Amino acid sequence: MLDFVPNHMAPDHDWIDEHPDYFVHGSEADLARSPRNYCRVQTRNGPLVLAHGRDPYFDGWPDTLQLNYGNPELQQAMIGELQRIAGQCDGVRCDMAMLVLPDVFERTWGIRADPFWPKAIESVRREHPRFQFMAEVYWDLEWTMLQQGFDYAYDKQMYDRLRDVRTRPVREHLHAGLDYQDKLARFLENHDEPRTAATFEPGRHEAGAIITFLSPGLRFFHQGQFEGRRKRISPHLVRAPQEPADTALQGFYESLLAVLRQPVFRDGAWGLLECVPAWEGNWTSDCFIAWSWQRDDGERRLVVVNYAGNQSQWLRATPVSRGGRPHGADEGHHGVGQF
């Protein structure tokens, strides 16, 4: 899977000379008023004021120039780039994919644009029907990107709730239908986030990884995560400082990957469970997140995580009903647990 950046180009790209109309232009007044969002570029046909690529909430990225999705010729050229890439790999991870949605693009630049992703994805799949599209996406637009035709979308909501150590919101996030959850790329770190080993305290790190990677969806790991690297590296660099591996964390991830290789976690049916209080007035059952995986041959796994900083108790785990019917597990999971 290759990284495809739809929103912007490098300032030395050939299109600057060959197709300057592919970029968002600015005026001298724009440059004077907002020098972090515009720059003067020397082209073969003379100087131009062009916009830096950006999202609507931050200043521009100074090593980029913004593509103009209001130009149908630019959209067709980008579809051509995707078609070319599709002959070289199995899929693309699309950087900040929501920035070229028509409403987001117009809000950022005041330029109306036709939808890009549905026709781009359809065009690629005419020749490469199994080609995969994954959207890096934020601002609660995951479902929107899936409706655009993406196979997977980043699950930033799960990450944020785990980082904030909020058990109930994490559990509520898992109430979503499997038609949605199966298409989420679940991660505990990526190149834009702080390193997990530097953000999650020991114990919380392992608990968060179990929740993230034993849930439904695409399991998405980051280079250095298994070794417990703590220094976040700019993607502009091709090197990193030497860091000693955390051998205990390495051992944990080796065990977790061994569990993930079990067929039940790949082709089993998943079902969320509710933990019943061990006795009346004991609130600590709310500290658990529990679910099961089960295959048609009866093989089953129960996963229970106490994501609180205190000991907690539960009496039994019962299946969560969705749409009035049980989902994946039965009441065979019960007993008294303390974690």
Image (spheres, grey):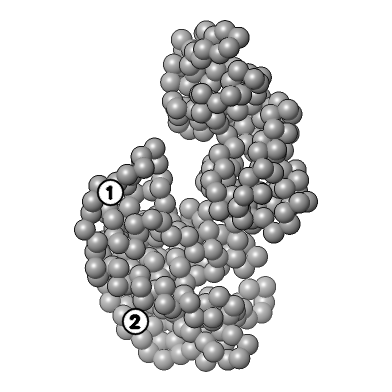
Residue drawn at x 72%, y 48% is: 124
Q: Which residue is mark 1?
A: 231
Quadrant of the rendering where the C terminus is positioned: bottom left
What's under tag 2, amino acid-wise?
A: Gln
In the rendered structure, find residue 169 and report the number of the disc placed on it.
none
Q: Which residue is mark 2?
A: 313
Secondary element at image label 2: strand
Name above or below for residue 59 compared with residue 196: above
What's under tag 1, amino acid-wise?
A: Lys
Dot 1 or dot 2, earlier in sequence:
1
In the rendered view, does 296 fall on the left or right side of 56? right
- Furthest toward the front, the residue is 88
In the rendered view, does 254 fall on the left or right side of 6? left
Q: Quadrant of residue 18?
A: top right
Q: Nearer the viewer, residue 66 or 81?
A: 81
**Rendering coords of residue 79 (x, y %):** 70, 39
Secondary element at image label 1: loop
Name above or below for residue 102 compared with residue 272: above
Label 1 Cα crowd, 10 Å radius (few <14 / some 14-19 / many 20+) = some
